[in-house]
Amino acid sequence: MDAQISSSVATGLSGRYARALFDLAIEGKALAAVEASLASLTQALAESADLKALIGSPLVGRGAAGAAIQGVATGLNIDGLTRNFLGVLATNRRLALLPAVIRDFAALNAARKGEVTASVTAAHALTAAQQKALATKLKAGIGRDVALTVTVDPSILGGLMVRVGSRLIDSSLKTRLDMLGQALKA
């Protein structure tokens, strides 16, 4: 089943890095710690423009990027395995892949649990109660447990964009306004 999970869920370069971290986490019985660390990193990436700039900048050298990401890891109390993994990403100049690696790791973990992953884009951060309600609604529609990966994108103005596999449910205000604009042009 693990080979099926690997080929169907995690693809590309980010998928290979995510699979390596996932396998090491299972082997080292550190899956829960890695999950918590990746959740902390996701939140930090959502809240810190400086961290986004660090991981996305090709101008930051390997040594500086490694030192900076280790400082971030210390500040966020990241577990040892994830800390080492971040060092590998920095050394290989792959820190820009971090959001995709986190997404692919979550998908691998969800597949292991028999869940399906839903990528949710919201205009504002969702509360735990809102996330739980959304997961419940999606479970009712899909028939399987749903793990949510939530990102915040203020440009959608309001509403949600939910992707489950190849299916997209777009109830964003931006899309509705765009459709209204197209209808008025016709």
Image (tube, rainbow, N blue to C red):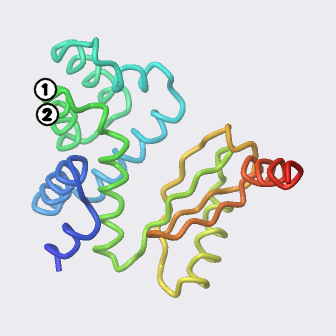
Pinpoint residue 90: horizontal percent, then vertical percent: 19, 27
Apparent side of residue 3 relative to residue 151 in the rendered image (left or right): left
Vertical comparison of 9 with 12: above or below: below
- Taking depth in this image into account, of 74 and 70 the one nearest to the observer is 70
Residue 29 as seen in the image, left or right of residue 96 = left
82 in relation to 182, above or below: above
Q: Quadrant of the N terminus?
A: bottom left
Q: Residue at 20% x, 68% y: name it.
A: 7
Residue 88: mark: 2
Q: Which amino acid does label 2 sit on?
A: Val
Q: Give whichever of 152, 30 is nearer the camera.
A: 152
Residue 91: mark: 1
The residue under the point 41% across, 47% down is 39
Mark 2: secondary structure: helix
Quarter of the figure that contains the C terminus: bottom right
| Residue 72 image point, x, y percent | 34, 25
Q: The residue tagged with tag 1: helix, strand or loop?
A: helix
